[in-house]
């Protein structure tokens, strides 16, 4: 079964990996998920057990969920690898609420309070 991460575009994935601390293996897992690979294909590629891939995807999804919860209160974020403060975000016509909404919809995360609406 393909992951909800397959719904992410490259710029969306880059935004997440710029703003959330993931180790290199988790970044690779996210990237491969976004490319549409199955857990079994990813496990074979990164030489980990399929159950480990499942656990790491769940952990990464939780990190993203936690990030989305605090995104509005952050004073700076990274966009295209550059640190950007809130005033500059508005100049760039980037609306944090819209960013949150897009990720929540694509990853099936409820932003109203901490529950996932779809299991991995």
Image: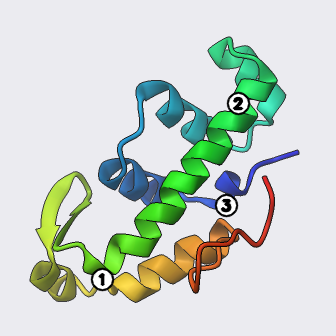
Mark 1 vs mark 2: which is more N-terminal? 2
Separation of residues labelled 1 and 2 (CA atoms): 33 Å
Q: Could you tell me which secondary element the residue under label 2 belongs to?
A: helix
Dot 1 lies on which element?
Answer: loop
* Measured Cα–Cα span from mark 3 to mark 1: 20 Å
Residue 102 in picture, x, y percent from top left:
54, 77
Residue highlighted by disc 2 = 53
Q: Which of the pair 79/115 is nearer the observer?
A: 115
Relative side of 75 to 10, left or right: left
Q: Which residue is mark 1?
A: 94
Q: Quadrant of the N terminus?
A: top right
Q: Secondary structure at mark 3?
A: helix
Above or below, 81 against 72 in this view is: above
Separation of marks 3 and 2 at Cα, in angstroms? 18 Å
Q: Which residue is mark 3?
A: 7
- Give the left or right position of residue 50, taking residue 110 as reference: right
Q: Where, by quadrant of the figure, is residue 71 drawn? A: bottom left
Q: Residues within 10 Å of mark 3 (few under 14, many from 20)?
A: some
């Amino acid at each position: 079964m393909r992951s909800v991460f397959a719904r992410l575009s490259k710029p969306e994935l880059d935004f997440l990996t710029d703003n959330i601390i993931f180790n290199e293996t988790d970044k690779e897992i996210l990237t491969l998920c976004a490319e549409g690979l199955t857990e079994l294909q990813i496990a074979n590629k990164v030489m980990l057990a399929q159950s480990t891939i499942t656990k790491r995807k769940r952990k990464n999804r939780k990190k993203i969920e936690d990030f989305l919860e605090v995104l509005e209160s952050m004073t700076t974020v990274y966009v295209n690898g550059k640190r950007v403060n809130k005033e500059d975000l508005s100049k760039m016509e980037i609306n944090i609420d819209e960013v949150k909404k897009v990720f929540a919809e694509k990853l099936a995360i409820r932003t109203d309070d901490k529950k996932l609406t779809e299991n991995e």
